[in-house]
Image (spheres, rainbow, N blue to C red):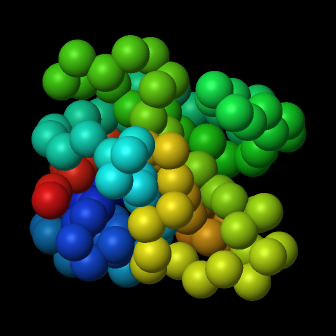
């Protein structure tokens, strides 16, 4: 994987190879206005096969295929690309802002990205 791009306006993720060929295009759910997803150029700093996601009002154990970002002053593990099986179970579609700032992905998308991305993969988040 050469680059992951997230378009906040379109609520869409693109993953491309070194030649710029799009390998994957999927809807995502990013931050709500009160907890926006940051924009800028980041990179995958940590990959967690299984981890606990925590915030002020939630704690979700056993989340698979989580990739957290670094760069542009982000706190470690503050913004991650991760599956949202609770969103899928509730029948809530992706492509709508729903998160606390992370980039929520369908489970199959999160697994694919996890398997095809290395620590250091660039991630560009655009408005």
The answer, for residue 23, to whether it is visible in the render is no
Residue 31 to residue 52: above or below: below
**In the image, what residue occupies the spot 63% across and 29% down?**
55
Residue 3 to residue 58: above or below: below
**In the image, what residue occupies the spot 65% across and 57% down?**
83
Q: Position of residue 59 (x, y in %)?
A: 78, 33
In the picture, the quarter occupied by the C terminus is bottom left
**In the image, what residue occupies the spot 67% across and 47% down?**
65
In depth, the one of 47 and 54 nearer the eye is 54
In the picture, the quarter occupied by the N terminus is bottom left
57 left or right of 78 in image: right
In the picture as drawn, the residue positioned furthest to the front comes out as 34
Residue 99 to residue 89: above or below: above
- Residue 13 quadrant: bottom left
- Residue 20 quadrant: bottom left
Q: Position of residue 121 (x, y in %)?
A: 32, 41
63 left or right of 103 in image: right
27 left or right of 61 in image: left
Q: Position of residue 25 (x, y in %)?
A: 37, 79
The answer, for residue 15, to whether it is visible in the render is yes
How many numbered callouts?
Answer: 0
**In the image, what residue occupies the spot 57% across and 33% down?**
47
């Amino acid at each position: 994987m050469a680059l992951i791009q997230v378009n906040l306006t379109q609520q869409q993720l693109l993953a491309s190879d070194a030649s710029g060929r799009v390998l994957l295009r999927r809807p995502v759910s990013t931050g709500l206005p009160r907890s926006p997803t940051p924009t800028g150029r980041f990179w995958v700093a940590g990959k967690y096969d299984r981890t606990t996601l925590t915030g002020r009002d939630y704690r979700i154990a056993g989340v698979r295929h989580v990739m957290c970002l670094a760069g542009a002053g982000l706190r470690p593990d503050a913004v991650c690309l991760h599956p949202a099986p609770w969103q899928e179970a509730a029948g809530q579609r992706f492509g709508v802002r729903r998160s606390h700032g992370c980039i929520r992905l369908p489970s199959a998308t999160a697994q694919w990205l996890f398997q095809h991305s290395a620590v250091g993969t660039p991630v560009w988040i655009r408005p």
